[in-house]
Image (tube, rainbow, N blue to C red):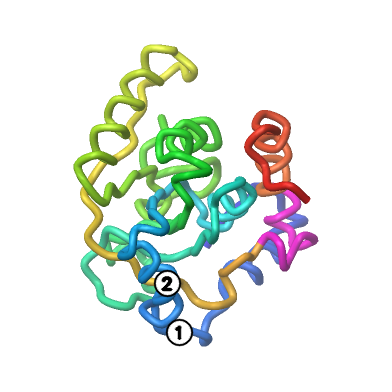
Amino acid sequence: MRFTGFLLLITFVYFGCTKAGDKTSGEMMGTDLDIKVQKGELEVATFAGGCFWCVEAIFEDIEGVVEAVSGYAGGHVKNPTYEQVCTTDTGHAEAVNIYFDPKIISFEDLVYIFWRTHDPTTLNRQGADVGPQYRSAIFYHNQRQKDIAEKSKAETDRLHIYADPIVTEITPFSNFYVAEISHQEYYRRNPNQGYCRLVIDPKVKKFRKQFKDKLKKK
């Protein structure tokens, strides 16, 4: 459950964050995209940066990103539900698979945006969202992604963008389970929901202002 700290919005936030019962197969939703990755037509990046609604809303706005899919990654429980992940016992993080065209946007650029659109210095926390499921992580798919992520992390630390050191986990990709349908494209479908208005909307607006040149053409 996510806590905004604003009592008047708790009811709305709670309702939006606890939907369940519409679990679908992770393999089914990702099949077409994964085939394109196997053919070399697309690449995939897997990021965790707090609430997956936030991460998805930002990256699906980027030119060259074909699809951003919310799900669960890095844990030991197969096909987890949202409720299981919220117990913090599964080892999973709320994560997003970002399918992108490398001819249009590079993995380097995606990582650059990743560092600047969440706080990578807070361990197991983003704002009021607390727990290991909200940890900051890059799940790399190959050695090249690992090298890029580690180099970019070191460079970002040297720039002192944040007062504290980056604690983002850079770890090999092991699994990804697509989240329930109610969590997909959540911000786009529920712009007036309490959490969206209070938490996601300011992040998205800041991102769009900072990365105007990276946005999809409307």
Label 1: few (<14), some (14–19) or many (≥20) C-alpha neighbours in 10 Å: some
Judged left or right of residue 70, residue 211 is right
**Mark 2 in CB contact with mark 1 (< 8 angstroms):** yes
Quarter-wise, where is residue 94 in the image?
bottom left
Name the residue beneath numbered marker 1.
24
Quarter-wise, where is residue 81 in the image?
bottom left
Secondary-structure class at tag 2: strand
Q: Percent from the top left, x then y, of residue 88? A: 33, 61
Q: Earlier in the sequence, mark 2 or mark 1?
A: 1
Vertical placement of residue 97 versus 161, above or below: below
Measured in 3D between alpha carbons, the distance from the residue under mark 2 to the one under mark 1, in whole angstroms, is 8 Å
Secondary-structure class at tag 1: loop
Nearer the observer, 120 or 189? 189
Q: Residue at x 46, y 57 (%)?
A: 99
Name the residue beneath numbered marker 2.
178
Q: Percent from the top left, x then y, of residue 157? A: 37, 18
The residue stretch that appears in magenta: 187-198
